[in-house]
Amino acid sequence: MRYDDIDKNDTNETAGIIIEFEEKILLLQRPQGTWAIPKGHIKEGESAYEGMLRELKEETQLEIKNNIRFLHRTKNKTGSILYIYHYHSDIKIIPIINKEHTDWGYFSLNRLPDNIDYGLNRFLDTR
């Protein structure tokens, strides 16, 4: 992320969501090659949950209204807090990615891409 991509109303906390379908999770690829869950900075005045929903919509055009549960709180590479939520889907949800990403896919936990985002990798190491 470039400095000019950061909104002045962003906090240093982030929130994201693991979308699971048939024991695979949805990951988005950033231009530099890193794979991550849909996530981003929480804005001032937003809860972590609200920030996660907003980022999910911005990055994938997806809106999920029910059955989202808080999963874990961990740290990003910068030391900031990352709130991770979870949604289990009975159907394969197809994202429409924005300019922040170049690709997407569903991956099983035992066959993840090599370039996993630090915060997600840290979370997966605790499982």
Image (spheres, rainbow, N blue to C red):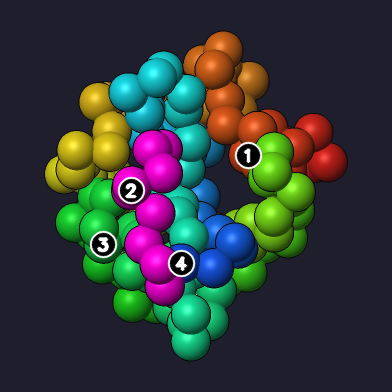
Distance in Å between CA atoms under marks 1 and 2: 21 Å
Using the image, tell me which numbered label, if any, was put on residue 10. 4
* Quarter-of-image position of residue 103: top left
- Disc 1 or disc 2, which is closer to the eye? 2
Q: Residue at x 37, y 27 (%)?
A: 29
Sequence-wise, the earlier of marks 3 and 1 is: 3
Secondary element at image label 3? helix
In this orientation, which residue lies closer to the viewer: 13 or 69? 13
Magenta-colored segment: predominant secondary structure: loop
Sequence-wise, the earlier of marks 2 and 4 is: 2
Left/right placement of residue 49 relative to residue 90 reads: right
Residue furthest to the right = 126
Q: Which residue is mark 3?
A: 57
| Amino acid type of the residue tagged 4 in the rendering | Asp
Distance in Å between CA atoms under marks 3 and 2: 17 Å
| Amino acid type of the residue tagged 3 in the rendering | Lys
Residue 51 visible to the viewer: no
How packed mark 1 is, by other alpha carbons closer than 10 Å (few <14, some 14-19, many 20 or more), is some
Q: Residue at x 36, y 29 (%)?
A: 30
| Amino acid type of the residue tagged 2 in the rendering | Asp
Q: Which residue is mark 2?
A: 5
| Amino acid type of the residue tagged 1 in the rendering | Leu
- Do the residues under discs 1 and 2 have CB atoms within 8 angstroms? no
